[in-house]
Image (spheres, helix red, strand yellow):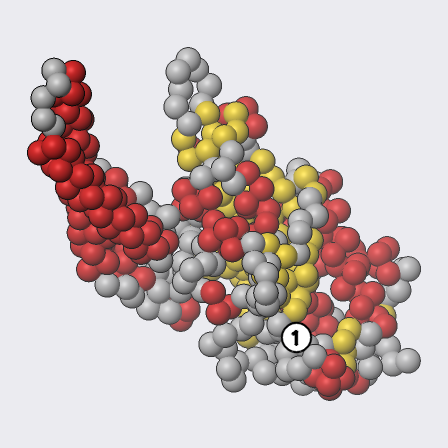
């Protein structure tokens, strides 16, 4: 959430710009209207005016109340003052009702405003203008025309799309045999790496959350249609473990010594994929249900971009160990997520598709989520006031897409698939997946 007080501060804090003007530029870079800032400021000014009017009426009530008491004490007629008191009281109640309505309107409006952008975010209108940072690993030279993962999986009888659709609907799949085993192997391998080598603490979160949690991380209210809701309840299936894990400290104040924290969680994820009609209709790329290992960090504001680089490196390590070629891009202003101040995407090479596809997004949300969920820390020192902490999240990795990358990059001419060396110990030392 954007700080409404900062929007009203006209001091030149950002390269000679006030925060409001800096944020207007960020909104326009995202493809949003700069007028949103003026609307927010107007609503807040209206709120301040109402607060002032209510305080003035309260002062008047106190004054009239004292006069009534004095009249009664001296046994004088106070009927006129009592009538005035009733009038002032009624007006005050009406204004208080107006204020409650306005504050709800302002709060809802502020919840729909995206995060500010870090200065390093490149300008651009869409994913075609994301900035490539580096490429790691060379795609294998194949002496045959590489197949896409769904064809490989169906030939090996380890992916069953038809029956997944039959029992659940489109974008659901059965993983069978070696694919199911490799999926679980990948989850355990990723968790082991992040816990034992990268210094994360594992956490298993709830797979359903309430509306308040989804508001805290930024999915609600703007992206409500992307989430599966359990009818008749305030439970929603999580679209990512980022939601429950980031809300772990909602409404709490941590000690400065408790930062940073690095948490890793495995969870199934559930997404309605609203607005993705016709995209990636084949295969596992875009499913309603998929597994993911998620990285979440809670950081001191001064250290969050250092932690962001570490998170990126930690996610990259998984691909390096699996010997999968990939590239890293910085998302441009027109492609970056609603709640992120800066995002790196890791894109793995898929020879069957002859392109790089996203397998991880690592984002620094700065204090955007912390403000929404009221997560703070108390700096060390006497009389130190609590400050909002910074939150970061990233995929470490999307498991289904990692399975896709292995099937396509490790495929052989005869239709079999080699198992990456680092995974073999998790799969009973199986080296090759072949037909049953």
Q: Please name the residue shown 27% across and 48% down the image.
A: 97
Q: Mark 1 sits on what residue?
A: 284
> Does 114 sit above or below residue 92?
below
| Nearer to me, 291 or 48 | 48
Taking the image as shown, residue 216 lies to the left or right of residue 42, namely right
> Does 190 sit above or below residue 285?
above
Q: Please name the residue shown 42% across and 27% down the image.
A: 386
Taking the image as shown, residue 335 lies to the left or right of residue 319, namely left
Q: Is residue 8 visible?
A: no
Q: Please name the residue shown 24% across and 50% down the image.
A: 98
Q: Give the image location of residue 275, x and y in percent.
A: 47, 76
Q: Residues within 10 Å of mark 1 (few under 14, many from 20)?
A: many
Q: Give the image location of residue 372, x and y in percent.
A: 42, 46
> Does 348 sit above or below residue 361?
below
> Does 151 sit above or below residue 182?
below
Q: Give the image location of residue 174, x and y in percent.
A: 76, 76
Question: Which quadrant does the C terminus fall into?
Answer: bottom right
| Nearer to me, 260 or 124 | 260
Q: Count every numbered label the image shows and give the total.
A: 1
Q: Is residue 391 visible?
A: yes
> Quarter-wise, where is residue 152 in the image?
bottom right
* Helix, strand or loop status at disc 1: loop
Taking the image as shown, residue 86 lies to the left or right of residue 381, namely left
């Amino acid at each position: 959430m954007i700080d409404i007080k900062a929007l009203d501060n006209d001091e030149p804090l950002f390269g000679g710009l006030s925060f409001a003007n800096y944020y207007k530029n960020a909104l326009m870079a995202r493809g949003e209207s700069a007028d949103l800032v003026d609307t927010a400021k107007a609503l807040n000014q209206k709120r301040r005016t109402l607060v002032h009017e209510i305080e003035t009426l309260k002062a008047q009530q106190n004054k009239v109340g004292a006069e009534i008491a004095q009249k009664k004490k001296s046994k004088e007629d106070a009927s006129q003052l009592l009538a005035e008191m009733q009038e002032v009281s009624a007006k005050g109640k009406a204004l208080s009702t107006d204020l409650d309505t306005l504050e709800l309107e302002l709060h809802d409006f502020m919840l729909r405003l995206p995060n500010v952008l870090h200065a390093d975010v490149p300008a651009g209108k869409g994913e075609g203008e994301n900035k490539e940072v580096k490429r790691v690993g060379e795609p294998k030279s194949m002496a045959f025309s590489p197949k896409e993962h769904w064809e490989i999986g169906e030939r090996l009888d380890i992916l069953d799309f038809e029956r997944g659709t039959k029992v659940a609907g489109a974008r659901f799949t059965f993983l069978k045999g070696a694919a199911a085993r490799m999926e679980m192997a990948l989850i355990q391998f990723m968790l082991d790496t992040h816990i034992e080598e990268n210094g994360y603490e594992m956490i298993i979160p709830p797979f359903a959350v309430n509306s308040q949690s989804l508001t805290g991380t930024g999915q609600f209210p703007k992206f409500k249609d992307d989430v599966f809701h359990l009818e008749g309840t305030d439970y929603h299936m999580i679209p990512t473990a980022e939601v429950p894990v980031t809300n772990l400290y909602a409404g709490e104040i941590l000690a400065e010594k408790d930062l940073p924290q690095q948490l890793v969680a495995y969870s199934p994820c559930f997404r309605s994929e609203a607005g993705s009609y016709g995209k990636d209709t084949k295969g596992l790329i875009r499913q309603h249900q998929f597994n993911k290992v998620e990285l979440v960090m809670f950081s001191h504001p001064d250290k969050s971009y250092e932690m962001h680089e570490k998170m990126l490196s930690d996610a990259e390590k998984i691909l390096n160990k699996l010997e999968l070629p990939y590239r890293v891009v910085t998302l441009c202003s027109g492609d970056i997520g609603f709640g992120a101040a800066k995002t790196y995407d890791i894109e793995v090479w898929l020879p069957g598709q002859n392109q790089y596809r996203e397998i991880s997004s690592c984002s620094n949300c700065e204090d955007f989520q912390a403000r929404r969920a009221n997560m703070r820390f108390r700096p060390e020192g006497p009389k130190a006031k609590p400050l909002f902490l910074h939150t970061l999240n990233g995929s470490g990795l999307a498991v289904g897409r990692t399975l896709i990358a292995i099937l396509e990059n490790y495929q052989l001419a005869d239709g079999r698939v080699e198992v990456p060396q680092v995974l073999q110990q998790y799969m009973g030392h199986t080296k090759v997946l072949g037909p049953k």
